[in-house]
Amino acid sequence: MRREERLIGQTACAAGTLRRASRSLTRLYDAHLARAGLTTTQFSILRTIQRDGGRTALARLASVLVFERTSLYRALAPLRRERLVTITTSTDRRAKDVALTPRANRRIAAATPHWAAAQRVVLDRFGRTDWPAFADRIGDLTEIARSMPSI
């Protein structure tokens, strides 16, 4: 085995390390957001649509959130049942749009203080000044993964 391969084999797996961190953080945020009746994934979906003006194409939403379309439909199903989002055919008839309902905007407003409380816990422990650069680096990892061909 070459020296470089040995060194790579001795480093922590990027995917495993990030997945463990992601699951741990999700549990923390889910515990806070449960008080408003949302999960971290649901809150993220709703806030992303809200940032897009309350309506967005499903394809765009899937891309921004790095979701497979089928996974996004499954994640949207409980939001539809709770009448927080509607899904309609877009103006070009080949795509679908997802839109927030007034009920969703109220739920986002109710959930935001709980999200902020979880965010404060993380930033206080991690370091408020360290977080922006770290978040940028994680974004770089996302872009690396997006640019890689699927095997």
Image: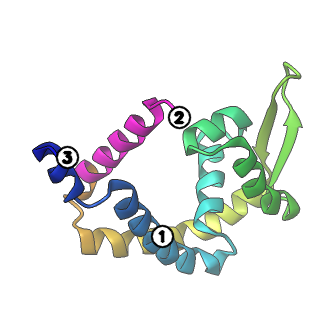
- Precedes in sequence: disc 2 or disc 3: 3
Q: Secondary structure at mark 1?
A: helix
Identify residue for label 3.
5
Q: Residue at x 87, y 62 (%)?
A: 81
Picture coordinates of residue 95, whole percent (x, y): 81, 27
Q: CA distance from mark 2 to mark 3?
A: 22 Å
Q: CA distance from mark 2 to mark 1?
A: 24 Å
Q: CA distance from mark 1 to mark 3?
A: 29 Å
Residue 123 colored in magenta in the image: no
Q: Secondary structure at mark 2?
A: loop
Q: Quadrant of residue 43?
A: bottom right
Residue 23: assigned label: 1
**In the picture provided, is 103 more to the left or to the right than 24?**
right
Q: Residues within 10 Å of mark 1 (few under 14, many from 20)?
A: few
> Which secondary structure type mostly characterizes the magenta part of the structure?
helix
Residue 50 can be seen in this image: yes
Tell me which segment is drawn in magenta: 133-151
